[in-house]
Image (spheres, rainbow, N blue to C red):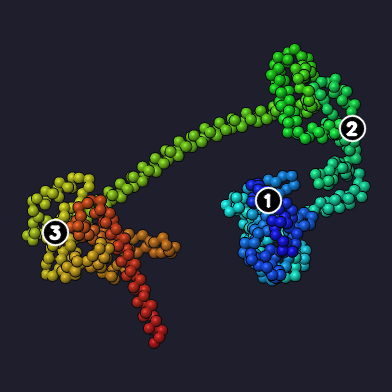
Amino acid sequence: MTTNMAERSRTAETGHDIGGDEIIAGNVNKYTVLPAGYSGQPKKGHLVFDACFESGNLGRVDYITEFEYDLFIRPDTCNPRFRVWFNFTVENVKESQRVIFNVVNFSKTKSLYRDGMAPMVKSTSRQKWQRIPSKNVYYYRCPDHRKNYVMSFAFCFDRENDTYQFAYCYPYTYTRLQHYLDNLQRRNMDYFCRELLGLSVQRRQLDLLTITSPEDKTDLENSVMQKKIKIPKLSFNHVEEAGEVTDYGEEDVELRHSKRQDGRKQSEGTHKSIEAVVARLEKQNGMSLSNTSSPEEAFMEASEGMNNMDDAVVPRILYEELLRSYQQQQEEMRHIQQELERTRRQLVQQAKKLKEYGALVSEMKELRDLNRRLQDVLLLRLGSGPAIELEKVKPETIEPEPEVQKTFSEEANTSTYFPAPVPVMDKYILENGKVHLGSGIWVDEEKWHQLQVTQGDSKYTKNLAVMIWGTDVLKNRSVTGVATKKKKDAVPKPPLSPHKLSIVRECLYDRIAQETVDETEIAQRLSKVNKYICEKIMDINKSCKNEERRESAKFNLQ
């Protein structure tokens, strides 16, 4: 039972179309798949594959692991490039045994397995076909198997004594079809006729079924026989002679079979003859229309010019149908070309609009960046105004030097205005242990000195905001006064004072100006003031909530 697959079911010839290194010759027959190096008797769980039954197809099985097997299906008869159908059984399973079957040599690039279809399965105790869950089925292209398409599906055997059968879809065998046709034929129905058309390569009969009313049956047979009449050289004289033939004799059948052996050349010759007839008649249509009195004469003149074609088999009715279909196709092609030209113009116009839209978008981004920079510069100018006016009110305390005033007046006329850097301790007024920051805002001198040694813009801005507003004010305010978008029912809080915000910006600017003179860096660092203050407000609110939770916990304990 444990025979070698290479000796049993395949030859040593190579074939790229098959998808493996060898051609698969026959189906597996009660083949037990054993692990490599195993020499004992098969145990429960060593799967036994079989496909030697009608409509069965499985040519080879490769053991990958205890839970995975590669399956190779045989190609269609007389066509080794098509490999789609599979139908096989598995037995000697173990309860709750999980396996993955990989059908590794599919030939179709597109399959319904990608769109939710799944293989069929049934067992001896459950004879009704069922589909495997689609979530356990995968169809993909695998580079390990010569880039063939692989269909993998996972399955769990639940009954040890059952024999499981897997198939591509619902199997419909040749025997079942013959039984069905025999039952129909035994009913002797008037509208049903069964005839033997021929035999297949494997000597199976090919049936011709005719389903029509009894009155139309005779007319149908006559029309079919009329289409079988051979008309050599497209001559009406030969049509009359050939019209007497009502059936093919034995010699004619042998002749047709001999011609089928070179069917490709025959079909090409017939196709060329049809094209020649159509082209010649269309070419001479304008000339012969005035000289001929009927379409039959035009057809006869066209057929006389084709005496060199000995095997022309084009009936007149077929020619007229071909001519009409050819003209219809030309008309449809003309409409399609017009539609394509109209679509091309529309695409060109849309491409131009998209190009203009892209230019507008880039220009809008530039304008937004410029607007943001101008806002920063304007805020800096507005923030420095009150401090300068306060210095003018108290000239006896400190008088600005003429050179500094000249510098201010020169830089005020430029579009990118930044106050000239002044030493921090020389700019702000000290009085009674207090430091005046401008706009009537005083802070403690000791806290101010501690603030100057703070590292980082974020910490400096947060500490300065606490010194100016205090935590009680900050926890009930927001920077902009706009409600947050994270909460649907959020209520907007009062905004912070604009003049105090300008003081914070000015103090941060004085600090940054001592470190760098790059205007771009200064503007970039100043733009984060609102962010730092917002973070401080969030920290204060979070600490207040934590304190409330602790108080409530103590109260509950008491």
The answer to which of marks 2 and 3 sits earlier in the sequence is: 2
Residue 437, image quadrant = bottom left
Q: CA distance from mark 2 to mark 1?
A: 46 Å
Classify mark 1: residues with Cα within 10 Å, few (<14), some (14-19) or many (20+).
few
Q: Is residue 517 left or right of residue 93?
A: left
Task: Name the residue: 53% across, 33% down.
Answer: 344
Residue type for callout 3? Pro
SS class of the residue under badge 2? Answer: loop
Tag 2 residue: 249
Q: 548 or 280, which is in the foreground?
A: 280
Tag 3 residue: 423
Q: Residue furthest bottom?
A: 558
The answer to whether 533 is drawn above or below residue 367 in the figure is: below
Task: Name the residue: 37% across, 79% down.
Answer: 550
The answer to which of marks 2 and 1 sits earlier in the sequence is: 1
Q: 129 or 312, which is in the foreground?
A: 312
Residue 464 in view of the camera: no
Q: Is residue 533 left or right of residue 417?
A: right
**Camera-side mark, 2 or 3:** 2
Picture coordinates of residue 350 (x, y %)? 48, 37
The answer to whether 40 is drawn above or below residue 556 in the figure is: above
Picture coordinates of residue 55 (x, y %)? 77, 54
Residue 496 in view of the camera: yes
Tag 1 residue: 12
Task: Name the residue: 91% across, 44% down.
Answer: 190
